[in-house]
Image (tube, rainbow, N blue to C red):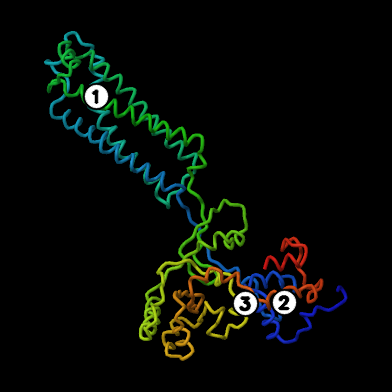
């Protein structure tokens, strides 16, 4: 075998070579695995392997957890409705009625404690209220705005600073409340302890309620901060590569984690990912489908079903060999259940009266259609959706027989390296195909 010239290389006709590969393999990637290390075959078949790994990526950042953002937003709303409204009412009441006066101050009160309470009410109250609004808006902007990127450690430090300010204010507020009890007349305190309030003691009840609200808020924020401290990297925005086009097909943006240590080819063409790629029909494509369905309705044939947003067919990402080798053709019969039309963009609408096209459109057991723009062409697939999912698995006796002949046809010039295909003998190749 080492001395024999490759039988494939002895085939002079490019057309015969193309037919061999078309019958022997169900998809172009199988052909590429065979010819990858045979420069002569690649040249004669006029195939550029890189053409089948064509894609466009854009860089982006995606928030790691939309649920986390939603939860933070919900907490902000609850905090605003309860704590901030209570603060606003307190501020209005303070500037309207004041707090301590001769009617509620006990005799011989401590002036230093009174000054502390006055400073808290007159200066700290309004300042802290405005600070909380500003910091909450800033937090939402920093964590939700994609144009602003902060590392996890910076986010933790920022949250830690906010938490320390809240905790300090909370401690001072408790001190203030204790001073209020010591400054208030004893008879008023006794009434308050029995649940009786008046305009003279309105601020006491508000202070107590605010302390309860702040206690809950401090507890929740402490739990969030504790989680962030132990997982600072986990709150970073995920760096993404966003796939917008694959093999000339514009797809709905599909993002990949940039931190995954895999080659882009391996990741993008991974089977699990290919099955998730989607495209969306435009108005011209929908109009074409309607015209095709009008032809079927005129012949009393059920309309072809379509979906405006649908998965990209794998037989276009990993195309059938005939779509590659016979590019000048416009109509392909892949099987009895799948017909593909390939025309320049918007040209098929003009050719709908073509007899061959109409004959295919009128096949009554075909029940679904999709239209995809690929490079400058429009790929129209009409098929039976009960069998289309297995289209890449279809083999016939000719293909199996040809694959079994591979040991005779290929010599050392053609064979693939074991580490590339992961197989050690041809029987395994046959099973894999």
Residue 423 rendering spot, x and y as whole percentages:
74, 62
The percent coordinates of residue 416 (x first, y second) are: 75, 67
* Residue 34 found in image quarter: bottom right
* Residue 69: quarter of image: top left
Disc 2 and disc 1: Cα gap in Å? 88 Å
| Left or right: residue 76 compared with residue 158 | left
Which residue in the structure is indicated by mark 3? 321
Q: Are marks 2 and 1 in contact (CB under 8 Å)?
A: no
Residue 36 % position (x, y): 71, 70
The Cα atoms of the two marked residues, 2 and 3, are separated by 15 Å
Give 260 or 131, whichever is nearer the viewer. 260
Provide the secondary structure element on which disc 3 rests. Answer: helix
Name the residue beneath numbered marker 1.
207
Q: What label sits on residue 216 in the rendered view?
A: none
Q: Earlier in the sequence, mark 2 or mark 3?
A: 3
Contact check, label 2 and label 3, Cβ < 8 Å? no
Which label's residue is closer to the chain start, 1 or 3? Answer: 1
Q: Would you call the spot at circle 3 few (<14 residues within 10 Å), some (14-19), or many (20 or more)?
A: many
């Amino acid at each position: 075998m080492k001395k024999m010239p490759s039988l494939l290389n002895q085939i002079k006709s490019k057309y015969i070579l193309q037919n061999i590969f078309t019958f022997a393999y169900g998809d172009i990637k199988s052909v590429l695995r065979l010819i990858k290390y045979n420069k002569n075959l690649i040249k004669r078949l006029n195939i550029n392997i890189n053409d089948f790994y064509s894609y466009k990526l854009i860089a982006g950042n995606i928030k790691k957890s939309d649920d986390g953002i939603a939860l933070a937003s919900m907490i902000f709303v609850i905090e605003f409705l309860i704590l901030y409204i209570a603060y606003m009412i307190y501020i209005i009441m303070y500037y309207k009625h004041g707090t301590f006066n001769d009617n509620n101050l006990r005799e011989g009160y401590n002036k230093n404690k009174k000054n502390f309470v006055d400073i808290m009410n007159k200066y700290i109250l309004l300042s802290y209220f405005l600070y909380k609004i500003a910091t909450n808006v800033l937090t939402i902007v920093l964590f939700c705005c994609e144009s602003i990127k902060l590392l996890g450690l910076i986010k933790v430090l920022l949250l830690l600073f906010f938490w320390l300010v809240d905790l300090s204010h909370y401690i001072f507020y408790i001190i203030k409340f204790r001073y209020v009890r010591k400054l208030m007349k004893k008879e008023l305190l006794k009434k308050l302890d029995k649940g009786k309030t008046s305009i003279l003691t309105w601020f006491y009840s508000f202070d107590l309620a605010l302390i309860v609200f702040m206690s809950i808020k401090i507890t929740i924020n402490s739990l969030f901060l504790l989680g962030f401290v132990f997982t600072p990297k986990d709150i970073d925005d995920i760096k993404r590569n966003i796939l917008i086009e694959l093999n000339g097909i514009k797809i709905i943006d599909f993002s990949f984690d940039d931190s995954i240590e895999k080659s882009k080819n391996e990741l993008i063409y991974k089977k699990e990912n290919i099955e998730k790629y989607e495209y969306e029909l435009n108005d011209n494509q929908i109009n074409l489908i309607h015209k095709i369905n009008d032809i079927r309705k005129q012949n009393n044939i059920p309309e072809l079903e379509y979906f405006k947003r649908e998965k990209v067919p794998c037989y276009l990402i990993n195309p059938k060999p005939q779509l590659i080798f016979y590019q000048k053709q416009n109509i392909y019969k892949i099987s009895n259940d799948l017909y593909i039309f390939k025309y320049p963009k918007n040209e098929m609408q003009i050719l709908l009266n073509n007899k061959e096209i109409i004959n295919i459109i009128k096949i009554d057991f075909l029940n679904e259609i999709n239209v995809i723009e690929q490079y400058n062409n429009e790929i129209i697939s009409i098929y039976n959706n009960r069998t289309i999912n297995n289209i890449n698995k279809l083999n016939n006796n000719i293909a199996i027989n040809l694959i079994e002949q591979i040991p005779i046809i290929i010599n050392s010039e053609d064979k693939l390296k074991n580490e590339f295909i992961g197989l050690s003998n041809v029987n395994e190749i046959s099973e894999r195909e």
